[in-house]
Image (cartoon, rainbow, N blue to C red):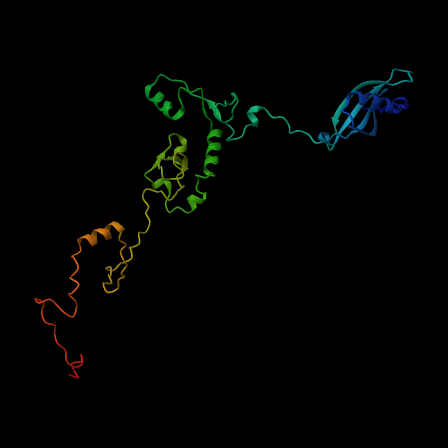
Amino acid sequence: MTVTTPKTDAVLLAASDLARSVLEEVAEPGTIGAHLGMDLLEERLGMHWFECTSPGYRGWRWGVSVARVSRAKVATVCETNLLPGPDAVLAPEWLPYADRLAPGDLGAGDVLPYRPDDPNLEAGFEATGEEDVDQMAFFELGLGRPRVLSAEGRESAASRWYSGDNGPTSEVAAKATAHCTTCGYFLPMAGALRVTFGVCANEWSPSDGRVVTLDHGCGAHSETDMDHPEPPAVGEPIVDEFAFDLEPAERSTAAEAEAEAEAPAEAPAEQTADAPDEGAAPAEEHHGSDDPVTD
């Protein structure tokens, strides 16, 4: 196969000024930079490139396509474009809504789009007419639902749960002294996942209401306990009856007036300490020193 390279077209190459003048009519003012050259796309068809200096389009280029008819000496502008260059800043590749959502993005009122080819689901089972078989299928196989978990869906969920915060490798499980499989609050799951997972029903546990593995654990295990140290001995209280403080009591003015009113009348002026009352007992006489040894 022979590839023919278009020859250089002098008329189109000389049309750079024409391309710039047309570009100034459609481009934002001040965003047309230096001329970057021309690519000859086909015979008598070329593209002039200009630098785009807009801050929001770093690495982009203005393109103006020019052409001429056979034997013509004048170029004609076909169209103008703003196209990304090799180093252009581009938006991320567009993803469908169903693929753009991440776990935890769904909020109140949000609805996920229906995925008819979800690899995590497979078709459900129809009733066979046999009571025992249908009863088993109703609980184990999802009878009555259009789709149930596929083997890939179960494996994906099991891997995610086992390596999560409620699996055996979490910090809570590593410090636990017993596993969930021996806890009274552990509720086994139905179906194929019951051999590895269950649900925690202990409101004191950080995993309450969550799927946990059999070898998970926490400090709220129903059969574990902690050491109860004996309380320190405390002796009988000692009351020091010889050391006490006296503080003057504050009496109000009304209380003082009432106390003065209840006091007995004063003795007559002629009765003094030198002349005691006749009915009083005679004062004891003392001779000599108070010291019994010297008397």
Q: What's the residue at 57%, 27% (across, down)?
A: 100
Q: Quadrant of the N terminus?
A: top right
Q: Residue furthest front?
A: 270
The x, y position of residue 272, in whole percent, is 16, 67
- Please tell me whether residue 217 is drawn above or below residue 106 in the rendered image: below
Q: Nearer the viewer, residue 257 or 12?
A: 257
Quadrant (top left, top right, bottom left, bottom right) of the C terminus = bottom left
For residue 29, side relative to residue 220 (left or right): right
Whole-percent x and y of residue 181? 36, 40
Left or right of 33 on screen, residue 10: right
Residue 178, placed above or below residue 283: above
**As drawn, is 200 to the left or to the right of 158?**
left
Numbered-mark total: 0
In front: 47, or 32?
32
> Which of the two residues, 12 or 6, is positioned nearer the viewer here?
12
Q: Quadrant of residue 237?
A: bottom left
Q: Quadrant of residue 162?
A: top left
- Of all residues, the one furthest to the left in this rendering is 279
On the image, the x and y values in percent for residue 103 come to 51, 31
The residue that appears at 40% across and 31% down in the rendered structure is 192
**Residue 240 in the image, given as x and y percentages of width and height:** 24, 63
Q: Residue at x 33, y 19 (%)?
A: 131
Q: Nearer the viewer, residue 287 or 125?
A: 287
**Above or below — where is 171 with respect to 249?**
above
The image shows residue 128, relative to residue 269, as above or below, that is: above
| Residue at point 38%, 26% (across, down) | 140
View extreme (bottom): residue: 294
